[in-house]
Amino acid sequence: MKRNFLIVAANGHARELLAGELREQGYLVSLAARGSEAERIVQSVTVDVVLIESHLPDMSADQLRERVTKARPDCRVVVLASLELARNTPGELRLGSGDFLLKGEQVIHLLRSLDAGFEGGADQRAIAALIEVIDVIVGLIEVDDRFFGGSSHRVMKLAQAVAQEMSVDQETLNELMIGTLLRDLGKVDLDPELLAARETFTEEQKQKMKEHVDSSVRLFEHIDSPWKVTSIIRHHHERYDGEGFPEGLRGREIPMGARVVAVVDAFVALTSDRQHRDALDPESALQELIRQAGQQFDPEVVEAFQRVLDHRFGKRRPRKKPRVLILEPKTDFRSLLKMRLLNEEFEVLEANDPEQALKIVLENPVDLLLSDVDAHPLETFSLLQEMREDETLRGVAFVFLSRRSDRVLRMRALREGVDDFLSKEMDTEEIVAHVSNVIRREAMRNGAPRKARRGITGDLENLSLPDMIQTLVIGMKTASIKLKAGRNKGQIWLENGTPRHAEAGRLKGEDAFFKMLRWTRGEFVIEHGVTSKAATIQNDAMFLLMEGLRIMDEEIAEAAS
């Protein structure tokens, strides 16, 4: 398994050179120029090995090593010195027998030996089985909750997809999935009516809601777990702008897993019914996340989540949750099916017999009827025939379930119009997969596909360029900002939160940057992970923003005189 590495070096050339060698070997690499910056990264993301240049501008290498080890006890820390540094630093020339200088290729060999030490970890199949067990237990706790049934599973699966879209390593992915499932178990002490109640709360109610985070952490903090899940549980209500709880962390101070959960959790909540409001459709919920990118949510995570939605729904997002009616007399099997369907974002209704099922579909439009055919075969076929002959009900998909391996029964059902005939001996997940395919086919027939969009889009009137720049700086993001203001177009590239290049018409570099600061009306697109080969900007973001504002103030004063 490839590991995550952090290189901490004030010497930019040495930093980039070593990073290049590591990346060629397939490792994931983060960079920091100062010890304080390295501390923030270690607290935010999973790091397996930290390489520290022996001379840093803000602290000694030994100080940083102690802080990294305290924050992540299982992290390997290696202090390095380049020969160039030794030649130019008198202290480094007084080397003793316990001091070493390493060549770049020697570092690679060292890291390979370190990496080999990780290979003997827990069996991933056992971890996957553990996650499935936790998923089922949490799902059964939620199954009969009108507002939260299946929500933990949905958040977990979406968080998993977002993390994979962002190319996290397997260990971080395991931590995220487990932490996501366990994050809200502290709510068991809360009044269910409070959880689903009004949109605004009294101060006392707000405090009770906040306390569930500490309750969840207390449930698991005494467990000697190989995964760092408590940081996800503790911080998934933090806000990117620092206005969240419990500690008011901001930007990359918030653990990466918690930033992912914050986005996905909000989406699942927005697309679920609550006592005070109906669910939003996925497209409207996504637009709300985009509006809050950089304030409540990490914009890079929002962009990755948008790509996940495009992939998941085949570039066409449904307007509402599909509604499935389960006609099944046995409550245990019905409950298990209900849990699985809730987990896959279906709304679920239940019936005990065909007569009750018909009454439900006449009063509540459904997308699919999943019906047992063994208990009442004549009545079930009569229900199928009645629905196929009714103008308003013939569009409802119909799937039969049976424990009998009866070819005659199967062929009769298919000839009379069922969309699928499934065995109850199947795994329930396989049954749900068939149901999903039937509904997906109907959705494809009834709607035109849409093109996937790239990046986070919006209007400059709602989010100014200085605000965008500051948001990307806080998160140390690598991204591009495309601007369109009337006939004017421009683009700015940032690397690790530092502006590197800008273009606006014939202008390049800082002149182009200052020109775009003047644009207050128009459209923008932020794309993360986009880099530029050109490097025309030397100053940092705060200097550029302050200098740009000074230039504009001078222009205004000159025009007024």
Image (cartoon, rainbow, N blue to C red):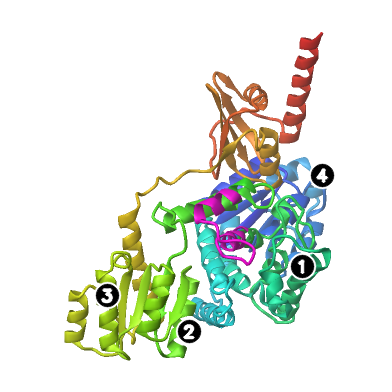
In reply to whether residue 270 is colored magenta, the answer given is yes
Instruction: Name the residue type under label 3.
Output: Glu
Instruction: Name the residue type under label 1.
Output: Lys
What residue did someone put label 2 on? 335
Mark toward the start of the polypeptide (4 vs 1)? 4
Q: Horizontal and vertical percent for residue 490?
A: 56, 27
Label drawn at residue 386: 3
- Quadrant for the C terminus, please: top right
Q: Secondary structure at mark 1?
A: helix
What residue did someone put label 1 on? 210
Residue 343 placement, left or right of 47:
left
Q: Are marks 4 and 1 in contact (CB under 8 Å)?
A: no
Instruction: Name the residue type under label 2.
Output: Ser
Nearest to the observer: residue 117 or residue 348: 348
In reply to whether residue 531 is colored magenta, the answer given is no
Residue 76 placement, left or right of 458:
right
Q: Disc 4 or disc 1, which is closer to the eye?
A: 1
Mark toward the start of the polypeptide (4 vs 3)? 4
Within-10-Å neighbours for mark 2: few <14, some 14–19, many 20+: some
Could you give the CA–CA distance between mark 4 and mark 2, rounded to whole angstroms? 74 Å
- Magenta segment boundaries in residue numbering: 263-288
What residue did someone put label 4 on? 90
Mark toward the start of the polypeptide (2 vs 1)? 1
Q: Secondary structure at mark 2?
A: helix
Could you give the CA–CA distance between mark 4 and mark 1, rounded to whole angstroms? 54 Å
